[in-house]
Image: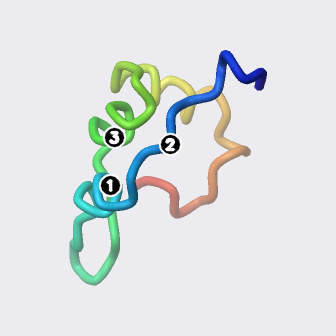
């Protein structure tokens, strides 16, 4: 990535507030992840679907 393409640094407290506890697991909603990256939710899901080998098995359920 060039300097022009770099994303701004997201403060820790914003990220931490988007992590939820569910049945003993830490989870983040796809919509929150998309918001952090500044893309539509469907784009996050498309990329996971198109690149399954890039994501760990427990990345989503």
CA gap, disc 3 and disc 2: 19 Å
Of marks 2 and 1, the one in the foreground: 2
Q: Are marks 3 and 2 in contact (CB under 8 Å)?
A: no
CA gap, disc 3 and disc 1: 6 Å
* Quarter residue 35 falls in: top left
Location of the C terminus by quadrant is bottom left
Residue at the location (50% across, 42% down)?
A: 9
As helix, strand or loop, the secondary structure at mark 2 comes to loop
Instruction: In this rendered view, identify the residue nearer to me: 39 or 6.
Output: 6
Residue at the location (45% across, 31% down)?
A: 37
In the rendered view, would you say 11 is above or below 42?
Answer: below
Percent position (x, y) of residue 18? 26, 55
Task: Say the numbered circle drawn on residue 9.
Answer: 2
Q: Earlier in the sequence, mark 3 or mark 2?
A: 2
Location of the N terminus by quadrant is top right
Q: Is residue 16 left or right of residue 22?
A: right
As helix, strand or loop, the secondary structure at mark 1 comes to strand
Residue at the location (22% across, 79% down)?
A: 23
CA gap, disc 2 and disc 1: 18 Å
Instruction: In this rendered view, identify the residue nearer to me: 3 or 40.
Output: 3
**Residue furthest out toward the right:** 2
Q: Which residue is mark 1?
A: 28
In the rendered view, would you say 13 is above or below 7?
Answer: below
Q: Which residue is mark 3?
A: 30
Q: Are marks 3 and 1 in contact (CB under 8 Å)?
A: yes
In the rendered view, would you say 20 is above or below 36?
Answer: below
């Amino acid at each position: 990535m060039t300097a022009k393409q770099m994303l701004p640094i997201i403060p820790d407290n914003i990220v931490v507030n988007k992590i939820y506890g569910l049945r003993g697991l830490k989870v983040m909603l796809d919509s929150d992840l998309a918001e952090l990256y500044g893309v539509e939710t469907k784009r996050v899901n498309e990329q996971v679907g198109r690149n399954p080998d890039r994501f760990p098995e427990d990345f989503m359920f």
